[in-house]
Amino acid sequence: MKPRVMSALYKVYGNPELFDGSYWVAKAIFRNTGTSDITDLRISYKLGDYTSWSPESTYNLVVPGGTVVDFYYPIISPRIAELKSATPCDLVIKYSYKDSAGKTYTDTASYRLQVLGINQFEFSNLPEEERTGAWADDFSNSPLIAAFVTKLDDPVKAFAGMVSQYAGGVAAAANDDDAIKFCKALYDLEVFNGISYQTPSGFLTEYSSGGQDLKYPRDVLRDKAGTCVDLAILYASVCEAVGLKSIIITIPGHAFPVIVLPSGQLLPVESTGVGGAAVGRSFSFDEAVKGGMKNLKELQMGRYFIVDVQELQKQGVSTPELPKLPADIFKQWGYKSPTEVAVQPVTQPTPQPTPQPAPQPTPQPTPQPATVISGLYQGTYRNNITGATGNMNVQIVQSGNNIRGEIEIVDEGNGTITGTIVGTNIQFTATINAYYGQFSVTFTGVVQGNSISGNYSVPASGVNGTFVLTRR
């Protein structure tokens, strides 16, 4: 029995032809340990209230010492997609058989498993004993990301229509030039409407099989934020909606979309280039393509999955039935094209002469000894503009009034810091290397015991926020 079932993939579990039949929900093993034949073995299954009793699997004869292995591929009700979080569910197996004298025996067995919520994704379905320690084993479910690419969902089609209009009404799948125009317009409209990168939230941390909450494209459009996987899924979905073949590539710690142009050429896009939750800086489409090219060139054998959306959906990795949304939901979410936004002229006030104050002597500050702050710090940040939050780690090495060290903005990037401390006042600049490029952040704060708190700003984008660090 699988310990966990993903409700998002309820259509996958009913397809025994998919992935060589590896996505069964239960496997029943019957052994005849007696000395006479068993006949008319019948097996049926039921998964909570989400299935009816399955048609009976029938085995006419099981000889002494013989074994029967039976797999359960349930036809699951779409109601299972209403689950928002992990929910316990009972799997019941009913079986009967006859002995050599014709006497019938009947029994049932019940097992409890977890049904994950509609957005919860488990990265591997391999049991511990079948794993080799390779990265691919821990992310064997990556191809199932194709079930989140919802090209037929109304919000996706509405966004695709806006993109097509902004691109000049091009037929995206007609030729490479029009396809690239569409892809650029899609990226630019994401930036214009404030869609940004956010750090992922994980679950299943008690198991070696990690999990992540994945958003459907409608969720990203609603929240105007998504992880690298979410943004790749959105980009692929909109391109698929206009007939452009899309691929999602997953690598250790990251995912990005690759669009197959009509000529067969590949157009990789670093979809997180729209901007980070902490920093807000956006890259141009050309820079995002360069980032995607870099990702593509650095693929390592055995450490990536190519998710061919069209092929996988054709095989049966189908999207779930999502709730119907109001017809005007896209408008409610506030999406606009730059051509819809009227620019109002700004009246400039007549400049007035400013009286110059008489020069005053500037008092010289008394130098203050620096507080000792060397050590490893952990903490959080909050973007004042978007409200996004995240975690960071900082290693500080102090020499007098000068500090240096390293910084990690979790799930976004890492880099180095340099700065100064006077008394309890600290200021340092971090140079961060992220998936979507390099940027600088200035931190200004106050030391209080083992804590540092204050404000940060990103000069390149004007984004600002607050932070708190605590020494470990």
Image (cartoon, helix red, strand yellow):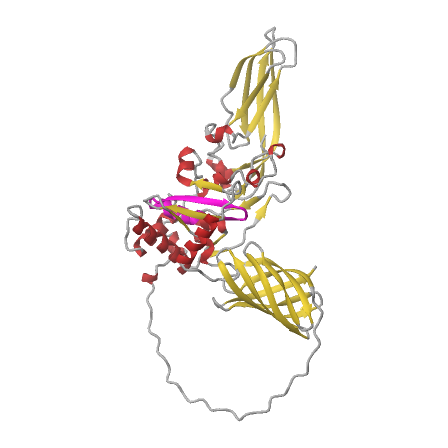
Q: Position of residue 1 (x, y in %)?
A: 59, 30
The reply to whether the magenta stretch includes residue 244 is yes
Quarter of the C terminus within the rendering: bottom right
**Looking at the image, which is closer to me, 341 or 167?**
167
Pick whichever, 15 or 281, lies toward us. Answer: 281
* Residue at x 42% of width, y 33% of height: 315
Residue 247 makes an appearance in the image: yes
Q: Looking at the image, which residue sits at the far bottom?
A: 358
Q: Nearer the viewer, residue 467 or 99?
A: 467
**Magenta residue check for 76:** no
* 110 relative to 41, above or below: below
The spot of residue 170 in percent (x, y) is 28, 51
- Residue 188 in the image: state x and y as whole percent: 38, 58
Percent x, y for residue 221? Answer: 43, 52
Q: How many dots with numbers?
A: 0
Residue placed farthest to the top in the image?
101
Looking at the rendering, the stretch of residues picked out in magenta corresponds to 233-254
Residue at x 64%, y 86% (from the top left corner): 364
Residue sitting nearer the eye, 42 or 20: 20
Q: Quadrant of residue 224?
A: bottom left
Instruction: Left or right? Give the position of 331 relative to 209.
Output: left
Residue 334 seen anywhere in this rendered image of the structure: no
Q: Is residue 139 above or below residue 180?
A: above
**Residue 442, relative to residue 261: is it above or below?**
below
Q: Write the residue at 53% across / 15% down.
A: 59
| Residue 167, quarter of picture | bottom left
